[in-house]
Amino acid sequence: MSVSSRFLISSLASIRPTSLRPTNVAKTFSTTSVRLNNSNSPIKVPINLIAELRKQNPISLSKAREALAASHLSVPDALEWLEKDLEASGAKKAAKVGSRVTKEGLIAVTVMGTRAAMVELRCETDFVGKNEIFRTLAENICSTAAFLDVQSVGGGQQQQQHPAGDPLALFPIDELLQAPVIPLDPAAGLLSSSSSSSSSSSSSPSHHQNITQAITSAITHTGENIQLQRAVSFSSPIPSSDENGGAAAGGPTTTQPFLLPGVYVHGAVKPGGNEGKVGALIILSTLSTDKSSPSVMDRLASTPSLSGDLQKMARAVARQVVGFPTRGVQHTGGQPVVLEEGEVSPYLMDQPFMMYQGEQRTVKEVLAEWARERDIKVDVAAIRRWSVGDEE
C-alpha cells in the first residue's frame, strides 16, 4: 500500500460519525425560530404576520419575530409588547444621554383660535433639530400646551386667570411633561411612521403617550439627549357679564377687551411650518370705539372682514417682534434708550413697522391709524420672543 493510500485511510478513520448528525445542521438555522419561556418547542413565526406587523411599525425582521413570538402570534399584542419594550430601552437610553449638553433645537408656536402656545425643545445637534421626528415632537408638545389650561393640568381651575398686565402664563415644565400628547392633527401619530405606536393602539386611551414618554421615544430614535426647556401658553378669558347683568340677562353687552394671539417663527425647518430658530407669541388687546356697537365680540361675529384684519395684524406684529431684537412693548421709564446711528429701538412701539407693508412709521403710529379706521382701539398686551439656546 502506498503512502498516500495509508494517509487517506487514516484521515477517514479520524472523522467521528456524530459530526455528521443532522441535529448539528439544524442548530445552524435555529435563529429562524424563537423559543418561549425556555421551552424546548420553538414557535415558528409566519412571514405574513411579520409583514403585517412591520407595516404598522417599521422594525427589523428579528425584532418583529421576537415580538410576535412573545405575544403568541397576535399582532395587536405584539404592538403593545413593542411599545413596552421601546419604553424600557428608551428609559435606559435617556438615562445614558441625560447629562449631555443641549444647545440646539427648535422654537415651536401654534394658535388654535383664541388659544396659543410657544415652547422651546432642545437637542444636541442641528442635524437632529431638523429631523422630522424631532420637529413633529416639538409641534405636538406645543399644541398640547395650547390646548390645556395651566391650572387644569393639575386638576385645578379650568379657566386660566391671567396675572394683571400679562395674559401669558408660564407652563410649569413638570406638569406639561405629565400631560397626554394632544397632536395638532389628532388623526396623525406623534412620530408618524417612526412611532412605536400603531394606529390601532393609539386609538385606545390606555396607549396614549404623555409628553415624557414621547420625548423618551424620540431619544431612542435619534440617539440624542432631548429636553423640554420652557413653555408659555395663552387662552382668551371668557368675558364676564357686567354689573347690570350682561347680555345673557338682557342687560348691556360687556365692554371687556378681546384678547387675540399672534405667532411667528423665523427659519422654519418645514415650509409653512411653525417650528424654527426664533419665535414670537404676542397678544393684541382690542376694544370697540363704535358707540352703536360697544362690544368688539359682537362686531367680530357680525363682521368677518374685521376678524380677518385683526388676525393679519396679530401675525404682522409677531413678525415684527421676531424681525428685530425686541425685548419689550414700550419703554416705561428709567434710563433713556441711547441708540447708535442705524440702530433700532429694542422696544416694539418705537420701531419702524417694517413687517407691515414696509412701513417706516413707528408701530405705535401705524397701529393707532389702522385701529381708528376700523373703529377699534388696539394695544399690544404682551410679547414673548425666544431664540434657541437663549439663557433665561
Image (cartoon, grey):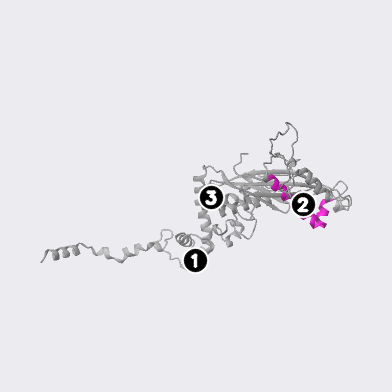
Image height of 339 relative to 109, above or below:
above
Q: Amino acid at mark 1?
A: Ala
Start-end of magenta stretch: 295-321
Query: Badge 2 is on which residue?
Result: 310
Q: Residue 103, percent across and down?
A: 56, 43
Q: Residues within 10 Å of mark 3 (few under 14, many from 20)?
A: few
* Quarter of the image with the N terminus in it: bottom left
Specify the amino acid type for callout 2.
Leu
Residue drawn 51% across the image and 66% down it: 52
The kind of secondary structure the magenta stretch mainly shows is helix
Query: With 259 as the anchor, is 205 left or right in this view?
Result: left
Task: Please give the label number shown on residue 51.
Answer: 1
Above or below residue 387? Residue 303 is below
Q: Amino acid at mark 3?
A: Phe
Whole-percent x and y of residue 242?
A: 85, 47
Residue nearer the viewer, 152 or 8: 8
Residue on which disc 3 sits: 127
Nearer-N-terminus badge (2/1): 1
Mark 2 crowdedness (10 Å alpha carbons): few <14, some 14-19, many ≥20: some
In the rendered image, the quadrant that contains the C terminus is top right
